[in-house]
Image (tube, rainbow, N blue to C red):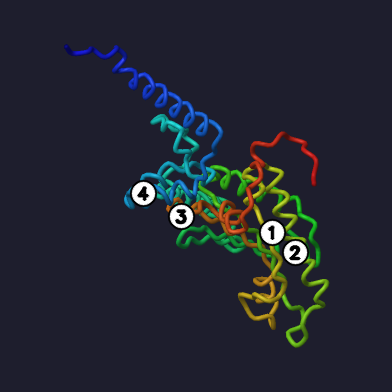
Amino acid sequence: MKKHKGGGGASWMDTYGDMVTLLLCFFVLLYSMSTIDQQKWVQLVQSFNPDAIHEITENKGNNGQIADPTTPVDGDQSENNVTTQQQVDQALDQLYLDLQMYVAQQGAAENISVTKGGGYVFISFNDAVFFDGDSYVLRSDGEEVLDEVGEIIRKAAPAIDELRVLGHTAQGDPNKPNNPSTDRFLASNRATVVLVYLQEMNILDPARMISMGYGQFRPVAENDTREGRAKNRRVELIVTGLDIASTLGDGIEQYYTERGTQAPISAETRADGAAVG
């Protein structure tokens, strides 16, 4: 006579189901506590699909950062966002054309020149535009020029990686260099005055604006004539566009990435009147 075993032969499925549920809860908990490192995420995606980097970089916004992979991509992009290199190039082309038109309308070709290169627009102002001799006090007519130029630059702001203001002086005596202290401070102060004026117009994130003083050491003409010295006493603006294809992002992101530190909150998002540190 056969003996029948007791029931409950399928009870292992209950235990297995409980284990799977607990594992699911465990991984959900880990994910909720985690943060995604953008660069490591890019490297991971590239390791599985090298072609995916093109799609990744196209999702970069006007701040040059790679889009968070957990954020849905909305097809309705803001008109101020620049998401492709073609848009950046078009913005720089338009900036160049707008500046050229301004110079032509003002009849200022003798004092202002505009050129364009690969990924940048270059603007040069001679000494008569902004400052009197041996002075770094901005002239009132110079302010009017900066008002117009600043508004033109503002239109291209989402595509701009960096705005550099360069100050130059002329060697007064062709046979004797200028006093280093006077020369360097004058060039730096002129560049800083122009940058501060543009910054106060709020045309661009201040973190993307830099002033530099070269003094007499990068002349564009000989210093032995009055005309040559006038050409050497100048202020220049270099406007560079974002490099959307760079996996490190724009210049600011690269700066902090290379140093292993986190970039501060953009000045565009800080409240007005924040204390200066």
Give me the C-alpha separation between circle 4 and circle 1. Answer: 34 Å
Q: Nearer the viewer, mark 2 or mark 3?
A: 3
Give me the C-alpha separation between circle 2 and circle 3. Answer: 31 Å
Instruction: Name the residue tied to disc 1.
Output: 211
Could you say whether the residue bearing mark 1 is in a helix, strand or loop? Answer: strand
Instruction: Name the residue tied to disc 3.
Output: 246
Give me the C-alpha separation between circle 1 and circle 2. Answer: 7 Å
Residue 153 at x, y = what percent? 57, 47
**Label 1 near label 4: C-beta < 8 Å?**
no
- Residue at position x 78%, y 85% in the image: 176
First in sequence: mark 4 or mark 1?
4
**Where is the N terminus found, in terms of image quarters?**
top left
Specify whether 20 is left or right of 6. Answer: right
First in sequence: mark 1 or mark 2?
2
- Residue at position x 41%, y 33% in the image: 73
**Label 2 near label 1: C-beta < 8 Å?**
yes
Give me the C-alpha separation between circle 2 and circle 4. Answer: 41 Å
Tell me if residue 218 can be seen. Answer: yes
- Residue 188 is labelled as 2
90 or 234: nearer the viewer: 90
- Residue at position x 80%, y 47% in the image: 277
Quadrant position of residue 211: bottom right
Tell me if residue 89 can be seen. Answer: no
Crowding at mark 4 (Cα within 10 Å: few <14, some 14-19, many 20+): few
Instruction: Name the residue tied to disc 4.
Output: 54
Q: Nearer the viewer, mark 3 or mark 1?
A: 3
The disc labelled 1 sits on which kind of residue? Ser
The disc labelled 3 sits on which kind of residue? Ser
